[in-house]
Image (cartoon, grey):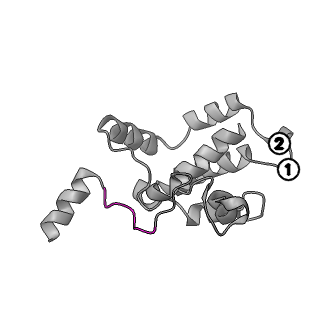
Amino acid sequence: VYSFGMVLLEVLTGLCPSKHDSRAKGGISFPIAETIKPQQTRAKERCLEHLDVEAGWHRPAALELASLGLQAVDCQSEEKRPLFRDLVRALRNVDQPVVQAVTSLSSMGHVQAPLQYRDQCQFGQASAAPPPQVGRPQQQHQQQQQQ
């Protein structure tokens, strides 16, 4: 359940759960833990403030998913974490327009890692270069027309 909660937070925010960072103790930093701070108050608000802009999250769905993800990563007490079957039931009831949008994008082959973090999620590889300018075909076409 904990791992699934981390995946939910990763999908929502585009942040990596861990990444190589030569400045951090042990050479590893934990962007989700450091940015969202799941165990502190206002974690849900921080999650919503750091939503992946490329995903275009519908706010009510993002709120529901953030709440589920934060419940699943509750480190204070395993007993407070939801059962996996309860997570599945809750996910089935998440805002329907989002489910339809993800299904549509996925069937068209457009579901990708968030652009702003794609190069940072490859553990052990630090990159000073900006992420590649890869986007959805519509965005690429619009960018070409503007030039």
Q: Splitting the image into 4 quarters, where does residue 130 fall?
A: bottom left
The number of numbered badges drawn on the structure is 2
How crowded pointer 1 is (Cα within 10 Å; few <14, some 14-19, many 20+) is rated as few
Question: Left of 118 or right of it: where is 21?
Answer: right
Residue occupying the point 45% across, 69% down = 128
Residue at disc 1, secondary structure: loop
Residue occupying the point 66% across, 35% down = 87
Residue 114 in sight from this viewpoint:
yes
* Above or below: residue 10 compared with residue 42: above
Residue at disc 2, secondary structure: helix
Q: Position of residue 49 (x, y in %)?
A: 57, 66
C-alpha distance separating marks 1 and 2: 8 Å
Q: Position of residue 115 (x, y in %)?
A: 40, 58
Residue occupying the point 78% across, 48% down = 74
Image quadrant holding the N terminus, namely top right
**Mark drawn on residue 80:** 2
What is the chief secondary structure element of the magenta stretch? loop
How crowded pointer 2 is (Cα within 10 Å; few <14, some 14-19, many 20+) is rated as few
Q: Amino acid at mark 1?
A: Gln
Q: Splitting the image into 4 quarters, where does residue 86 fall?
A: top right
Q: Amino acid at mark 2?
A: Lys
Image quadrant holding the C terminus, namely bottom left
Magenta residues, as a range?
128-134
* Above or below: residue 85 compared with residue 72: above
Q: Which residue is mark 1?
A: 76
Q: Nearer the viewer, mark 1 or mark 2?
A: 1
Q: Are marks 1 and 2 in contact (CB under 8 Å)?
A: yes
In magenta segment, residue 98:
no
